[in-house]
Image (cartoon, coloured by chain):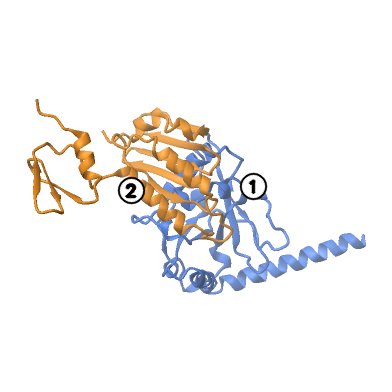
Chain colours: A orange, B blue
Amino acid sequence: MRGTNFNFVNSLVSSAFVELSPVASGCIFFDKSSYVVDVSMPVLFDVSNNPTKELFDRLRDLKARYATGSMPDSTPPSEKAFQDAKDFILTLPLAQIVKPAIHVASDGEVNFHWAGPDFQIDLGFYGDERFSFYGAKEGHDPILGDDVSVKDGIPKALVGFASAA
Amino acid sequence: MPEELSRDEKKSASPWFSPGLVSSEEIILRTVLDPDHLKKDGKLADAAISLEDIRVRGWSVDRKRFTSPWAIKLFHSRWKRKKPAISKFYVLPILVRDLRYRDETTGIQEFVAVDAALWFKPSHAAVLLSRLQPPSAARKLRTDLIQKLPRYVDVSRAFNSGDRYGYTRGLIWHLRTLLFTFLRHITKFKD
């Protein structure tokens, strides 16, 4: 039976001394020493595509950019607003839905926005461990929510709106 | 909670300095100060309009008939000094009628444009919701509004040669209102 030993793969990928290069039939793992380990196994994941990391990186950039007020009478987002956004990202089924665009508004909101040809979702955090949202999709009733706990994650109906399929 | 701006379009929010109420045929200009809010298709990101602004404080705009290109450029150059990384600012020229639409679901005019002139800034006005709404409803209306807004343009494209004296016009009305309001108060005091 052919299968993937993820423990083995993870131990190699997490090593600082290993480079991984995907090839058509499997993976070749290069160690910095003089020998090569050739393991024949299917590539089941794309190591370069990590949406969670990309969203975290975006939050980190925004946090640095908006460390002080950016506009007249503006309020930079609180540390807690960024933390809520991070916690929320961890609840997102990113294999199933498209990535949101993240922006900061002048009132300190960390805003998540999804848009597609037939749907729109607007959702945001102010750092009170809660979020509010509005979602609309053609052929469906719009969905609105206020004071939703970050721990509850994204509502299932919104996942349906933003699903890539 | 920030101070709530008047939502009554038939009254000025600053009667001492008002050059007049905002008409539906006017163009208002909104400067986009944050380049992160400019989308490649010429539209704005949702975050370009803060919920607090449309719910309570008012989204600041300039009335084109009471300002001039130099006044807008002066404002931009002051911000460029504070944010040297920003090479250019853009404006959104919005016809007031386009934001005084009636919402398809509620049948209510959800946005108002009110005169909110400031001392020596007669062009200042504000856009906000016609009634206080919860954040989720404000998100819906913000999404609707952003879809209706025009594309952002360079300041020079928002004006033509006849707009050169807008600020002077605004200032004359500004001082006239100030004088009349002052005289009215004096007369009342004497009576």
Labelled pair 1, 2 in contact (Cβ < 8 Å): no
**Vertical side of A43 occupied by B59: above or below:** below
**Vertical side of B166 occupied by A3: above or below:** above
* Mark in the foreground, 1 or 2: 2
Quadrant where the C terminus of chain B is found in the figure: bottom right
| A80 with respect to A161 (left or right) | right
Tag 2 subunit: A
Residue under pointer 2 = A54
Q: Residues within 10 Å of mark 2 (few under 14, many from 20)?
A: few
Tag 1 subunit: B
Q: Residues within 10 Å of mark 1 (few under 14, many from 20)?
A: many
Query: How far is mark 1 from mark 2, CA to CA?
Result: 41 Å
In front: B83, or B66?
Answer: B83
Residue at the image position 9 percent from the left and 48 percent from the top: A36
Whether residue A1 is visible, yes or no, is yes
Instruction: Residue type at mark 1: give it.
Output: Arg
Instruction: Residue type at mark 2: give it.
Output: Glu
Residue B117, x across and y down, in percent: 65, 61
Whether residue B112 is visible, yes or no, is no
Residue at the image position 8 percent from the left and 38 percent from the top: A40
Residue A18, x across and y down, in percent: 19, 49
Residue B80, x across and y down, in percent: 48, 71
> Which residue extends farthest right?
B191
Judged from the image, the secondary structure of the residue bearing numbered disc 2 is helix
Residue at the image position 56 percent from the left and 68 percent from the top: B67
Residue at the image position 37 percent from the left and 55 percent from the top: B39
Residue B115, x across and y down, in percent: 63, 56
Residue under pointer 1 = B7
